[in-house]
Amino acid sequence: MNQLRLKRHAGRRLGSGHLWVFSNELDSLPDFPPGKLVEVIDSRGQSYGTGFYNPNSLISVRLLFTDEKIDIDFFAGRINKANLHRNVFFPDEQCYRVVFGESDFLPGLIVDKYDDYLAVQYLSAGIEIRKDTVIEALLKVFPNTIGIIEKNQSRLRAIEGLESYDNTAYGTIPDEINISEYDIKLSISLLAGQKTGYYLDQKLNRKYIRIISRGKNVLDCFCNQGGFALNAAKAGAGNVLGIDSSEEVLHRARANAGLNGFDAIDFAKADVFDFLEKEISNGSEWDVVVLDPPAFAKNKKSVPTALAGYRRLNKLALQIIPTGGYLATSSCSQHILEDRFAGEVQSAASRTGRQLRLIHRGTQPPDHPILSSMPETAYLKFFVYQVI
Ligand code: SAH
């Protein structure tokens, strides 16, 4: 097997369990095909095991921490292990993330399970060129699978030099499927949905919102297919309104409210920033406001603009929450660290003359585990504050 040598001192991070070798850490960047398996050694010849090489990415090698052959048994073994971990936390759930890339030592592979359908994403060249083996391995671990869809539109693929595509890789994928998240019924579209079909990462945070929603007026900003709003309604909220800028997802949110028999719930199409401005000028009040925007920082360069965006959004929300009410605020930007996000919320509070106390600090659920040696695997922040 071809060996790639690290520059002197470049091994320290890898020694502590990080899985990525950056292009400036290697002695040379040979013109091997993207995805080729290579062995990484340090300047003294000590091996860090094998990994997927990609000459088109700043992440030159994604380590696999194995000497095994990378075949169907390797993939099935790791997928099975990942699935067993999920079964501990979600024994009765049929929808969860089975594989979360590096955190499951399958760099660049995402697998989301929606009952007997799987939605997969390939975010590394190593997985892309082995996709047929990955699909076979998935069918071995989940023999009842009806359909597997490849949802390969992620911007992370472009960074890896991979093109975008969606494809049915196995079986059939209907226009809509009916699933459930705990006791909430959902109709989702794997074909048309954003990401892999549903935002599974907010599963526990959506459930958390029930604690503070009973008898309250709840505003779910960036509601997508109704996730937080439906949980608020389930908890017996007095009145729930979900806001999103996409008519396609709102049509599903309304259908989902119907599926669950909720009637004190409504959904409206609007830009959240404009909507909040209007609510402020109308003097409206909402006891609970949920903010779950898309990632404002897509890369390191956009962090300052994103921080300003979070500050502005939280400032607007804080102006419509009465004393005693709650702000549940999220950020899914990997480049924005938890403390900086909390700092922006605090800054929004002081600029609006509000006092906040932190009630709950949430993050990713156990099916999106954070590898502590790789801060890059942590992205979701979810804070619940009470306005006092
Ligand atoms: N809260 C959702 C997930 C939110 S994903 C859940 O629990 O499943 C972010 C959503 O924000 C997407 O549905 C997207 O359509 C919407 N969106 C993005 N920018 C927006 C804006 N400026 N105003 C309103 N909605 C927006």
Image: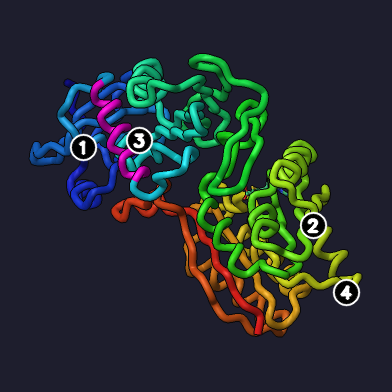
Amino acid, disc 1? Phe
Structural distance between the alpha carbons of marks 2 and 3: 44 Å
Q: Which mark is residue 264?
A: 2
Amino acid, disc 4? Gly
Q: Is residue 297 visible?
A: yes
Residue 151 location in percent, x, y? 55, 27
Residue 215 location in percent, x, y? 72, 70
Check disc 2 and report its element: helix, strand or loop: loop
Structural distance between the alpha carbons of marks 4 and 1: 58 Å
Structural distance between the alpha carbons of marks 4 and 2: 21 Å
Q: Quadrant of the N terminus?
A: top left
Using a 10 Å C-alpha cutoff, classify the residue at mark 3 as few (fewer than 14 neighbours), some (14 to 19) or many (20 or more). Answer: many
Using a 10 Å C-alpha cutoff, classify the residue at mark 1 as few (fewer than 14 neighbours), some (14 to 19) or many (20 or more). Answer: some
Region of the chain picked out in magenta, as a range = 73-87
User: Which one is earlier in the sequence, the residue at label 4 or at label 2?
Assistant: 2
Residue drawn 64% across and 50% down?
Answer: 227
Q: How many marks?
A: 4
Residue at numbered disc 4: 283
Check disc 4 and report its element: helix, strand or loop: loop
User: Which one is earlier in the sequence, the residue at label 4 or at label 1?
Assistant: 1
Residue 275, placed above or below residue 66: below
In the displayed structure image, the side of residue 309 where residue 281 appears, left or right: right
Check disc 3 and report its element: helix, strand or loop: loop
Residue 294, placed above or below residue 329: above
Q: Nearer the viewer, mark 4 or mark 1?
A: 4
Q: Nearer the viewer, mark 2 or mark 3?
A: 2
- Circles 3 and 4: CB atoms closer than 8 Å: no
Residue at numbered disc 3: 107
Residue drawn 50% across and 36% down?
Answer: 156
- Residue sitting nearer the eye, 182 or 169: 182
Q: Is residue 129 visible?
A: no
